[in-house]
Image (cartoon, grey):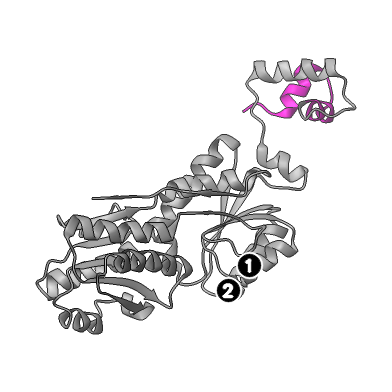
Amino acid sequence: MVTIRDIAKHAGVSVSTASRALNNHPKISQKTRDKIKAIADEMGYLPNYNAKNLTNGVSNAIGVVFPPGEMSSAANPFYVDILMGINRELRPRNGVLSVAIANTMAELAANVSALITQGLIRYFVLLYSKKNDPIIKLLRAQKVAYVVIGDPNADDEKFVNNNNQLAGQKAGEYMLKKFNASRTLFVESEPEQGFERKRRLGFQQAMAAANIPSEVLKISEKGQMKLDDAVAQFLMTRQTIDGIVTTDDTLGQMIYQLLWRHLDRSVPLICFNRNRTNNLLMGPSVRFVELYPQSMGAAAVRVLMDPDKKSEIIPFTIER
């Protein structure tokens, strides 16, 4: 690998002069800069962007912050797709990823703080959005740039998101038009997250406009870890429900399994997100609201790096 020292030796100058010339230092004449850059090109020199940026007091890495909680959330295909999108957009920028993940908010804050002070990272992507978030307070106090994936928490906050309320409405309209549902159910987690509330509101708007009765089922985090008997009992007492929308594909898989394996029922199902490794949700009456998480990740980098750009809204589709 060609180094600065090799270029300096070939050009007959000191290493510091070669380095300054390649970095367009004003104390180096234009003639010398052009000469040394030509030698560098001829020798196939590739700059070490990490070293260069650390010398300038900033890293070219982006810190990606996972929501605090179970470590297994990092394996969630939705997050994996977002990371792939971030990496795709970083590649031509010679950027790299650094991840902050922890079980508790205190541990996460310490992780992020270390990335700032030790890694000299000045750009962050938060894979969640939460009001009064200690991590956001830390990033603001440290005067580092960040973007959230979700709804903004302040007027000046950069964000990337889907139009969740419109997506909920369109999912409801699709359910009525495609499957002629006459009694529906919306399934979300407990406690409800902001994006879930908007999806539910949009769905309920579609049901109200069509005068279709609808219920809401909230499933706790504990209930999501297994095929909850209480959920099965709930579905058994709602035999007239003929259309179900779940706020994500994890809940969708759970409802699908309960209906088919335990209740021997077939009910049209639409779930948000599309886990392409999940082969269980492939029945003829299953649809997905595709949110394009890779596009969200790439958009987060664009918004973060562009001082004139505040947000991007990623379109969605409803498909098999």
**What residue is at 45 percent from the left and 68 percent from the top?**
71
Give how far apart the Cα atoms at labels 2 and 1 are. 8 Å
Q: Quadrant of residue 53?
A: top right
Q: Is residue 283 left or right of residue 316?
A: left
Side of 43 where 297 appears, left or right: left
Given residues 8 and 218, the one toward you in this image is: 218
- Does 15 appear in magenta? yes
* Residue under numbered circle 1: 135
Image: magenta residue range? 1-21
Q: Is residue 16 magenta?
A: yes
Q: Which residue is mark 2?
A: 105
Q: Position of residue 168 (x, y in %)?
A: 36, 61
- Disc 2, disc 1: CB below 8 Å? yes
Q: Position of residue 285 (x, y in %)?
A: 16, 58
Q: Is residue 18 left or right of residue 206?
A: right
Residue appearing at x 43%, y 47% in the figure: 294
Where residue 64 appears, x then y in whole percent?
A: 56, 56
Up-down relation of residue 124 to residue 255 (above or below)? above
Dot 2: within a 10 Å radius of its alpha carbon, few (fewer than 14), some, or many (20 or more) residues? some
- Name the chief secondary structure element in magenta: helix
Residue visible at 15% across and 81% down in the picture? 236
Q: Which element carries disc 2, helix, strand or loop? A: helix
Identify which residue is drawn at 36% across, 66% down.
Answer: 205
Please state which of residues 73 and 184 is positioned toward the viewer in this rendering. 184
Amino acid type, residue under disc 1 in the picture: Ile
Q: Is residue 279 visible?
A: no
Q: Secondary structure at mark 1?
A: helix
Residue 119 sits above or below residue 205 on the image: above
